[in-house]
Image (spheres, rainbow, N blue to C red):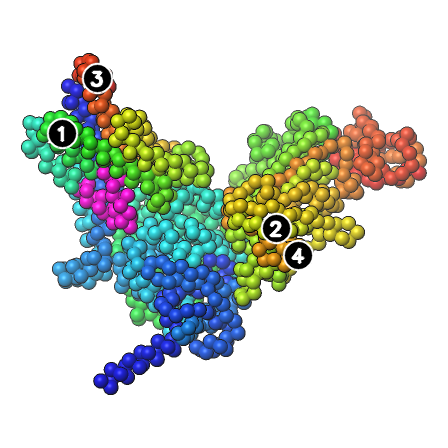
Amino acid sequence: MLQINAKSLLKLCVIFIFLGRAYQYLFYNAPFRALLWDENLLKPLVEQMFNTNWNAYVTDLSIDKYIQASIKTNGLLYLVAAICTAFIDKSNARYLKYPIMIGGFLLALLSFLTLKERFFQYGQFFEHAIQVGIPFLLLHVIRKDGFTFQIKFILKVLIGLTFISHGLYAFGYYPIPGHFIDMTINGLGVSENMAIAILKTAGILDFAISILIFLPRTYKYALWYAFIWGILTAFARIVAGFNADFIFASLHQTVYLTLYRLPHGLIPLLLLILAASVKKKDKTKPSLLIKTQLS
Amino acid sequence: MKKRIASTLFLLFAMICHANNDKYRLILSSDPATTMTIGWNQISGTAPTVHYGTTDFGTNYTQYPMSKTEDRAVAYRGMDNRFVRLTGLTPNTNYYFVINDSQGTSSRFWFKTAPNDLSRLSFIAGGDSRNNQTPRRNANTLVSKLKPHAVFFGGDMTDGDSDAEWQDWMDDWQLTIASDGRMFPIAATRGNHDGASVIYNLFDTPTSDSYYAMTFGNNLIRTYTLNTEISVSGNQSTWVSNDLSVQTNVIWKMMQYHKPMRPHTSAKSEGNSEYDAWAQLFFDNGVRLVMDSDSHMVKTTWPVEPSSGIGSDEGFVRNDAQGTVYAGEGSWGAPLRANDDDKNWTRNSASFNQFKLIFVEESKIELRTIKVDNAASVGEASNTDPFTLPANLDVWSPSEGDVVIILPIAPLNNPEIAFANGTSATFNDGTNLTLPINVLNNGDGISSVAFYIDDVLTETDTTAPYSFTHSYADGNYCIEAIATDVNSNTGDAKIYVNVGMFTDTDSLPVASGENDVEETETGAVYFDSGDLEMVYDSYDFVSNVPNGNQKIGLRFQNLNIPNGATIESAYIQFRSDESDSVAAELNIFAEDSGNSVPFESNAVNNLTGRARVGENGVASFVNWMPPAWASSGLTGLDQRTPEIKTLLQKIVDGSQWEQGNSCVFMIEGTGASLTNQDAKRVVDSYEGSSSNPPTLVYTYSFNSSTLNVGEILEQSSNILIHPNPFSSGLTIKVSNANNDLYKIKAVRMYDIKGILVYDKAFVNQTASYGISPSKISQGVYFLKVYGENNNVIGTQKVIKK
């Protein structure tokens, strides 16, 4: 019972990621053009393979439609992966694991393309560590029917990578993105200078959390912080982007951003639940405990 | 073999004779009529110097009358970028230049400064030149043929912001140089494919955040370059809001930035941050044209204003008379996206590589979309007439016409009102004061007058005659009345009301970059410095002439100090911009003016030429010997001037002073600061830190029973006194007795020191009033006559024999 419920939370996280990305791809955009429009990289290939010049290739709107269609197709794949995630268990994993694996690889591709689009700032790549990693971990958990020590450790590594990467932007190692600052200004009603100070502090805490989650004495507190901060930063997208005059439009543009970031908070919660279950195992019935935790 | 030797010798000769530099660009970031920045890549060689003048001496650098070495050098994107900032240029004038270094002399280039009058201007505006070199080169070639006064480039020059891509881009930019060597300046914007520092380092923008503004012509158009890749709602919006609000004399205002608020391609997210921060601000401040990029397609809109009401689409509604035209969206030389997200206010959209050709004159702005693909076959405009379109220029001609014309906002028949009491009024007792409104122009029919006390709406009067009755505690209040007519046109009036005895403190920062200036030793006034050196400044605002021991001018606006106030304390708070420890000595002066006018950039000695407060012809000053400043960013007591209340008191005591007026303080070096260049203190200017500019902090006390000299001396034609001089009694007649406002309620008499010596109230009101101030001694007195609403009917000097 304990592990089924923990597994459900992991499933929920994977569903959130696939649904959020599916929404993004179906209604907005994905950085496919970061690769397909790279003149330096693809021009020789395109001109030789398609016997056309580069200008004709990148100004042909029918090709642009194909690119957009491929993005939407990818969005549909994410949707299928989300549905498969909802229904996968040990009995049907043999079939349902493939859409999830494909979804995971497509998430990894997305991370690479985002990395390329953001001037190869590696923080951008590893910020997606949780999002890319947990679909594969879910498959592993289903196959093993449980959360092994290695799985928990990997989850911590994914949390650490995500938080360190986030911290690199918040702290200002990479230029602080303008939307980070605007989110803080609009969400908290502070000045820009104060917003930057808050972000720098959050960045330092991100670094600290990434270490403290591995220390026996501190990991619980660190995970609680990661849970709260992860949820807050996910919902910050909705709060900062909310506009009373354009409620639907603003939600249309922000809910998916929140969806695929929710695991940044929920994965630390999952580890807390697993930690609590281990600790209480000797003293009480674990199923009751976890039921309480999850209810 | 002989050929090889000859080739080698030729190459060596070329290397010796030619400066080893390339990737030239002209950059605009300040006054386009008098400044120009020349940038290039220094491959090798040393001591590069720009030699320039208004006569073409070809590559003979020794003949050019002026020269300037680099102001900035920065190694960035695989290039050794050098920048020379030319200042003090003559407007509307050809300047020829070469770059000479230890290895030789560059080709001869030239440029033309922008006019400083209302002459017509030509701009090219576009953006996004990544990943499609062919149209990029075509667009660049067209720049050289269309010969604009400036090119506004909306960002995303390259795809990956890499060294190689930028070097290619700069090489392609050389195609913008005309065949006769004429170059055209760029105002560069940062896009999402541009790294955080690249625009600053390659185009020498005024700040590292790369948002800035400049005014062309005689206030013909002010162009703003904003940065959508940093916070749009923080300091940047504060800056642009402040700047827009003070640029009331500018005829046109135009914006450029990268990410559109409402992209016209469906795959792009809405720019809600930009919309929330800027859309209403632009509309309210008369910004009529916005250039955006990012989407790689083509759009023009009808003039629009922000609205979520009926008929709106994505937050805008069409407003042909007053709205903002948004034009874009990128595709200077880029892969194309579909134009599949039109709004009901979209004028036309399409997908092709293009830029906008914009002609600006006093009576209109014309905007055309130019297709770039046929650049090779396009003719060339003349250097003196960039407005006649060259042969074969491919102007887009969509369904709504090929030229977008923006006309000035027609003057509105706004209501005009004024407080009957004038602009400042003093009362001993604040109980039930009534402030009547005089309607000077009824507009289209005033429907209401709203009254605000210190910006808080307190009452709305919908029935003429309009007035506002309220009880006030002792203190100082700003009352604003806003009249609205049936067509929602508005007009307003303000009055300062001072009641009883009170003390007040205000903190007043300089409001814009035009209000903190440096005057060089030669008398030129520089507006745009990011810091204020007190005293010595090696920067040469005028080419090749260091500012030297400069003087600082600070103009503070809207001082809420009533006539007759006693200044209890005053000082100016600065923020240090660097650490300085050598003992400095400064003198602070104040302008002798009841209302200091703005600084002027084109007038010599516009700061030091101003009269100074003083006594017996000797200027008064406060000496300041600031202690050492340990670092930049300090805003403590050490960065504060000594008491300058005596100077401020003299300003307020002046006969022309009125509450809400402006004043100017001047800071000059003295003693060691005139002989030792390090004996200085450097503070942030408004441009350096809009959140910590120089700030005047003052405290004053006020007693309504003591009139100030200036107020007493104000004579009035509303009352007639007889006899004057008088011995025991006198009669007061009111010139407009039928008006309720002129029925006398009280008469008070003050001696020459402003002390109340006689006070008489009237109950039965007639056209003539007699008083007998018999107990006062012989001398000069001031009689003040109050109306039914405590309004001051008039003041008259009287003499008792």
Which element carries disc 4, helix, strand or loop? loop
* Residue B455 or residue B3, whichever sits in front: B3
The three-letter code of the residue at mark 1 reads Val
Along the line of sight, the residue nearer the viewer: B656 or B623: B623
Tell which of B245 and A259 is nearer to you.
A259
The residue tagged with tag 1: helix, strand or loop? helix
Q: Are marks 2 and 3 on the same chain?
A: no
Measured Cα–Cα span from mark 1 to mark 3: 21 Å
Q: Quadrant of residue B105?
A: bottom left
- Cα distance in 3D space between marks 2 and 4: 24 Å
Tell which subunit mark 3 falls on: A
Q: Amino acid at mark 4?
A: Thr
Judged left or right of residue A203, residue B504 is: right
Query: What residue is disc 4 on?
Result: B608
The answer to which quarter of the image holds residue B757 is top right
Residue A141 circle label: 1
Q: Would residue B457 be seen by someone viewing this image from the given angle?
A: yes
- Image x and y of residue B645, in percent: 69, 41
Identify the subunit bearing mark 4: B
Q: Is residue B208 magenta?
A: no
Q: Residue at x 21, y 17 (%)?
A: A280
- Residue at 21 percent across and 57 percent down: it is A41
Q: Main secondary structure of the magenta part?
A: helix
Instruction: Please name the residue that numbered disc 3 is placed on.
Output: A280
Q: Which residues are magenta?
A: A106-130
Distance between the alpha carbons at the discs numbered 4 and 3: 81 Å
